[in-house]
Amino acid sequence: MPELPEVEVVTRSLKRTIRNHKIIKITVNNRNLRFKLQKNFEHILKNKIVKNIKRKSKYIIFDFDNHFYAVLHLGMSGTLHVPSKKKITNLSFYSNPVLPKKHNHIIMNFKNFKLIYNDPRRFGYFKILNSKYEFDEYFTRIGPEALDKSFNLIYLKNKIKNRKKNIKNFLLDQKIVSGIGNIYANEILFKSQISPMKSVKKLTLIDLDKIIKFSRITLKSAIKFGGSSIRDFKSISGDGGSFQTKFKVYDRENQKCVKTKCKGIIKKIYISNRSTFICNFCQK
Ligand SMILES: [Zn+2]
């Protein structure tokens, strides 16, 4: 599943490709995405110019100006492709070298190219928001982004009050902080030397400070390396990211802890059915 860094990478390449271009025509092959695509989607967006492409948490926002937006969530396996003669951009899912056409659900035609939304598992979706009110309302459900200044010590201190959650589930709760998914929650807690099972009630201010600091460092570094190419993630150009080679704890079961002087071996456990990697020696 693409997490914040991967969505940011897609957003940046999408912005370079379609900003200020006009949608000439949209073909919808399958409306049954996670939420059914609204009936007149293709007509509403026809002849609209994409003024900007932005990201909010894990949502990609097509900004058509005047508070008119199409919001895209890539779900588990959604990808965007711009096929061209010079370069094959329709790269693989699950090591398949061919973009499976039957999963090309939405095709946006611009003057000289087209943008394909492909999604084998159909957990992604598009939603049109056509006023400032609708836009703000839609995003009130999600908490501040981990990279945002409002994700700070005062905010976190207030949020952990009277809660019993463990810190891993807390970080994964998008209403509390948005943009941290399973991989990055594992990495952040390892770097902060905090056990994912620790109750948020027991976190000290120093712990919270570390969590904020390492959330930023981890996400920024992942964006820099083009996201993590695990399973099905590819950016719009078809290039994979390389952050997976920088994982310190995620997917390192039975390997030695990378912290100097630590003799721990990484264990894999499950917290709320999600794979969790931990060094019992240095994460307390
Ligand atoms: Zn360790």
Image: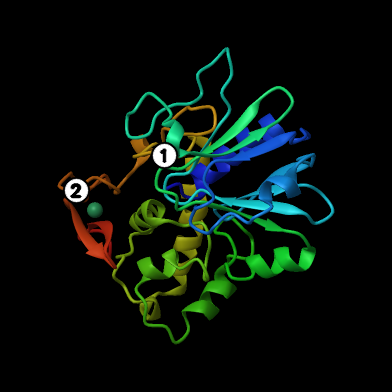
Residue closest to the far bottom:
162
Q: Residues within 10 Å of mark 2 (few under 14, many from 20)?
A: some
Marks 2 and 1, Cα distance to the nearest angstrom? 18 Å
Where residue 164 appears, x then y in whole percent?
Answer: 37, 82
* Residue 203 visible to an observer of this rendering: yes
Residue matched to label 2: 253
Residue extending farthest to the top is 86
Q: Residue at x 52, y 46 (%)?
A: 30
- Comparing 85 with 140, the one in front is 85
Type of amino acid under label 1: Ser
Q: Residue at horizontal 41%, vertical 39%?
A: 228
Say left or right for 24 vs 142.
Answer: right
| Disc 1 target residue | 228
Horizontal side of residue 72 vs 74, given as left or right: right
> Earlier along the polypeptide chain: callout 2 or callout 1?
1
Occupied quadrant, residue 98: top left
Mark 2 near mark 1, Cβ–Cβ under 8 Å? no
Q: Which mark is residue 254?
A: none
> Looking at the image, can residue 220 be seen?
no
Q: What secondary structure is marked by label 1? A: loop
Which type of secondary structure does the marked residue at label 2 adopt?
loop
Q: Position of residue 209 (x, y in %)?
A: 49, 65
Nearer mark to the viewer, of 2 and 1? 1
Q: Quadrant of the C terminus?
A: bottom left
